[in-house]
Image (tube, rainbow, N blue to C red):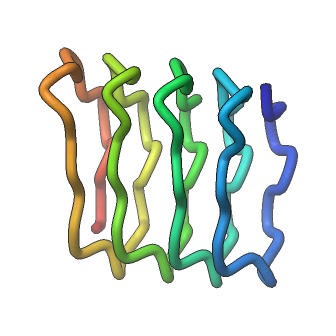
């Protein structure tokens, strides 16, 4: 697990690869990482917590892995440069403000 607020406001991150053994990204874990452009997820990921990537303003592309069934509140809210989102058909629920102001 990557804990709540673990990397909040780390403005120097540009690319993140979530390791295969991570099954959960905590609430606001990468919130405010304003230089983050790319995220790579593996299919073992089960949960992306509320606001995990909130205000990651440089993020441009996201592919939600098949292992995710729910996109939580505010996960990508404020990602104003987000242009491409791939959501697998395994996603059954997209919660409040998940992509607000994208």
Side of 77 relative to 86 (left or right): right
Decide: is 30 above or below 67. Answer: below
Assign the N terminus to one quadrant of the image.
Answer: top right
The residue lying at 55 percent from left, 69 percent from top is 56
Side of 94 relative to 32 (left or right): left
Q: In the image, residue 71 lies at what x, y percent? A: 36, 30
The residue lying at 55 percent from left, 26 percent from top is 45
Residue 33: quadrant of the picture: bottom right
Residue placed furthest toward the left:
89
Residue 77: quadrant of the picture: bottom left
Q: In the image, residue 87 lies at what x, y percent? A: 21, 41
Assign the C terminus to one quadrant of the image.
Answer: bottom left
Side of 8 relative to 20 (left or right): right
Q: In the image, residue 79 lies at what x, y percent? A: 42, 68
Looking at the picture, tell me which residue is in the foreground, 30 or 45: 45
Side of 16 relative to 76 (left or right): right
């Amino acid at each position: 697990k990557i804990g709540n607020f673990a990397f909040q406001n780390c403005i120097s991150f540009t690319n993140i690869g979530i390791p295969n053994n991570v099954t959960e990204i905590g609430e606001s874990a990468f919130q405010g990482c304003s230089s983050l452009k790319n995220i790579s997820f593996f299919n073992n990921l089960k949960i992306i917590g509320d606001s995990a990537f909130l205000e990651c303003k440089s993020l441009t592309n996201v592919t939600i892995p098949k292992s995710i069934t729910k996109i939580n509140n505010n996960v990508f809210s404020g990602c104003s440069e987000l242009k491409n989102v791939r959501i697998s058909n395994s996603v059954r629920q997209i919660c409040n403000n998940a992509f607000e102001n994208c």
